[in-house]
Image (cartoon, coloured by chain):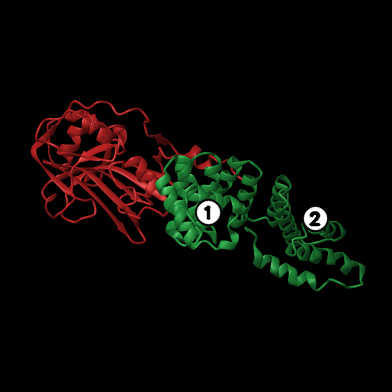
Chain colours: A red, B green
């Protein structure tokens, strides 16, 4: 009468988050690779990263490090402009931003990533070789994205690559979308006129999930 | 706890009308009413006996049989005879014919009690896979689904996923005290005593005290949380 417990999982291709220890980051390119996982490894790798002086300013956040910002919830306090650009495979990264917000009846939204010079296509082309699972990093309209989705209750490191919600569609309750995206920045400063290279978590984003994927944050910031 | 009272109340109204009648057929039907009365009076062995007689001595419609088996399942469950509870519940659901998301959740709880959390998880996932919300297909998922999901995951030792499931349910129903307690247990297993304490404290503040058992009080005491 009842289908197998793994009915959904059997139908859907899945990706598993690597549980490997973060590698020591010695170059901006290695940092971008760690960032492109859109998980905790980016923040863990920053603990011991050897990066060019005058680029990212880092702070301790719990057991990890992250680019310093005032607050992901405070308008005007979510951005750090680098004193000197971080050059990643020829792309000039000029800043970092980290935003979080709740939209009632839609869910929680977290965005974090770099602000780059150049068009989205130029930036994506140069960064693509550095991106983890880049076969799925594909054009979606004017943006280039790698998307995946988790249903609440799935193993915490497991993401589905089928049955995605698609651009412009709200994440259904009980699901979380995770997207790595290269896109045109907001129309408002400081992102205006730039391209953003960012990760996002959207939908039913809970504290137990954030504790795993965003160790730089207070997991309860959106409770 | 998981019982579908409206259906049983309807059943009782039908059956109690037959009690005490002299006609043999009606006397046989009285066993069905007696089953429910005994269940309500928590005379569980008698409820089982009367339920068996109700099924044996009568030619009942399948929907009626389904209800009798449902009461038997709850009765076995209260007697902690969990494998028999599961069997009776499955029989009830089989007779009912159509998928019933709430019955799946009830059966999930019985499988957990019977020591089979894998099957318990399977049942909740069946609802999720088929968009069977508590109020029917496409109605969306709320606390009951995520609560049973979390409990099955807890029993499987998947505490992080369990905490996530309870958190999701609490977004839908933030006043459900047992959601906090269950999440506190998951955090406790994860070694996250700060979050566990916050949840146990919230639980102690909003729970209906009459349902708090010794095991719950012991857990609160472990965290030095007094019951208000």
Element type at mark 1: helix
Please, is residue A179 above or below residue A222 in the view? above
Read off the residue under disc 2. B45
From this viewpoint, which residue is outermost toward the left? A84
Which residue shows up at 26% across the image and 35% down it?
A42
Dot 1 or dot 2: first in sequence order is 2
Numbered tag placed on residue B145 in the rendering: 1
Q: How far apart are marks 1 and 2 (CA)?
A: 31 Å
Residue depicted at 20% across the width and 55% down the height: A74
Image spot of residue B137 (x, y percent)? 53, 58
Nearer the observer: mark 1 or 2; the answer is 2
Q: Which mark is residue B215?
A: none
Pick whichever, B170 or B218, lies toward us.
B218
Residue A199 drawn at (x, y percent): 27, 43
Mark 2 falls on what kind of element?
Answer: helix
Q: Residue at x 34, y 61 (%)?
A: A104
**Looking at the image, can residue B142 be seen?**
no
């Amino acid at each position: 009468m009842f289908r197998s417990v793994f009915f959904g999982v059997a139908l859907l291709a899945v990706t598993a988050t690597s549980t490997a220890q973060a590698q020591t980051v010695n170059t901006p390119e290695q940092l971008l690779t760690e960032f492109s996982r859109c998980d905790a490894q980016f923040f863990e790798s920053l603990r011991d990263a050897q990066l060019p002086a005058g680029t990212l300013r880092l702070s301790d956040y719990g057991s990890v490090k992250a680019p310093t910002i005032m607050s992901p919830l405070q308008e005007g306090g979510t951005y750090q402009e680098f004193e000197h650009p971080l050059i990643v495979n020829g792309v000039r990264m000029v800043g970092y931003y980290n935003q979080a917000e709740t939209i009632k009846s839609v869910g929680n939204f977290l965005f974090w990533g770099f602000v780059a010079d150049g068009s989205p296509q130029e930036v994506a082309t140069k960064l693509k070789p550095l991106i983890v699972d880049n076969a799925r990093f594909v054009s979606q309209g004017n943006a280039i994205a790698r998307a995946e989705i988790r249903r609440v209750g799935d193993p915490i490191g497991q993401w589905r690559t089928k049955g995605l919600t698609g651009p412009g569609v709200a994440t259904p309750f009980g699901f979380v979308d995770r997207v790595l995206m290269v896109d045109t920045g907001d129309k408002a400063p400081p992102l205006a006129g730039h391209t953003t290279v960012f990760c996002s978590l959207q939908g039913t984003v809970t504290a137990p999930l954030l504790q795993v994927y965003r160790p730089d944050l207070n997991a309860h910031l959106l409770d | 706890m998981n019982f579908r009272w409206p259906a049983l109340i309807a059943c009782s109204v039908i059956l109690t009308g037959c009690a005490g009648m002299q006609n043999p057929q009606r006397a046989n039907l009285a066993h069905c009413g007696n089953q429910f009365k005994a269940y309500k009076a928590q005379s569980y062995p008698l409820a089982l006996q009367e339920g068996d007689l109700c099924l044996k001595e009568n030619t009942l419609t399948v929907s009626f049989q389904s209800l009798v088996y449902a009461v038997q399942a709850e009765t076995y469950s209260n007697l902690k005879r969990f494998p028999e509870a599961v069997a009776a519940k499955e029989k009830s659901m089989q007779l009912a014919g159509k998928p019933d998301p709430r019955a799946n959740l009830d059966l999930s709880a019985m499988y957990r009690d019977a020591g089979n959390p894998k099957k318990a998880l399977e049942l909740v996932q069946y609802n999720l896979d088929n968009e069977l919300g508590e109020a029917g297909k496409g109605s969306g998922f709320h606390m009951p689904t995520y609560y049973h999901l979390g409990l099955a995951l807890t029993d499987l030792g998947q505490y992080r996923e369990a905490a996530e499931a309870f958190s999701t349910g609490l977004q839908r129903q933030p006043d459900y005290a047992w959601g906090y307690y269950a999440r506190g247990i998951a955090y406790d297993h994860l070694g996250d005593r700060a979050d566990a304490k916050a949840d146990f404290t919230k639980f102690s503040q909003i729970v209906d005290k009459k349902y708090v058992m010794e095991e719950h009080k012991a857990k609160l005491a472990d965290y030095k949380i007094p019951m208000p």
